[in-house]
Image (cartoon, helix red, strand yellow):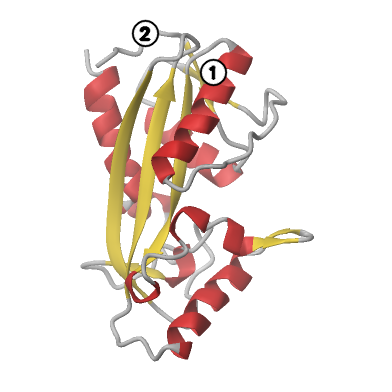
Amino acid sequence: MRTFDSSKLVIATHNAGKLREISALLAPFDVAVTSAGELGLEEPEETEATFIGNARIKAHFAAKASGYPALADDSGIEVDALGGRPGVYTADWAETPNGRDFVLAMTRVWEECEGIAAPQPRRARFRATLCLAWPDGHDEIFEGAAEGQLVWPMRGNQGFGFDPMFLPDGHDLTFGEMSPEQKAPLTHRTAAFEKLVAGCFAR
């Protein structure tokens, strides 16, 4: 596994929420963090049907365009009652002509569960796949998950995405009700990051 030894890392995202989470996780390391959005890079088309495939597309695109190592996250929520949907298409469920609307997406998920009378608890998990890519084409992949269940109505206005309807196992607050400090240790992204740090940042 390749050790990260660059002074700069590009986060391959235009999502401010993801950038904040990832920057906080990288804070203990002596690395300057910027994002694809801040560099004015385009967003490549995500054409794969897996989290790994799309993470690779984003990370390699940013690494080649910037000349620096790049870290991409592809993540989503899988609902057991819906056969794992929306999964890799999580963000697509929120797309509207005026941008992403996750309230609309969460409502769709709940209504589809209601439509098939899915039994309670309605199990779900967030999945995160990280791809750390170098300009020479090398990459490393790390995966994490957060298990829980769906709740309705939505609760909380913290976080982003599907956080207000996701209740992590062993807790009484949704991700949307938790402060960033409460949520951080429990997330799929943190689980993947622990593997990334152990594999590429540990000295």
Which amino acid, by three-letter code, is at mark 2?
A: Asp
Seen in the picture, residue 83 relative to 199 is either above or below; the reply is below
Residue 170: where, in percent of width, then height? 21, 67
> Residue 51: horizontal and vertical position, in percent?
42, 44
Residue at 40 percent of width and 39 percent of height: 52
104 left or right, relative to 20: right
Count of all numbered marks drawn on residues in the image:
2
Which corner quadrant of the image does residue 66 belong to?
top right
Q: Which mark is residue 5?
A: 2
Q: Please state which amino acid type lies under the numbered disc 1.
A: Ala
Q: Residue at x 23, y 18 (%)?
A: 202
Horizontal side of 18 relative to 83 (left or right) equals right
Identify the residue at horizontal 36%, vertical 20% (top origin). Answer: 29
The answer to whether residue 68 is above or below residue 80 is above
- Marks 2/1: CA distance? 15 Å
Picture coordinates of residue 20 (x, y %)? 52, 39
User: Is residue 125 or residue 7 the one in the foreground?
Assistant: 125
Residue 163 to residue 63: above or below = below
Residue topped by disc 1: 63
> Which quadrant, please, contains the C terminus?
top left
Quadrant showing the N terminus:
top left
The secondary structure type at the circle numbered 2 is: loop
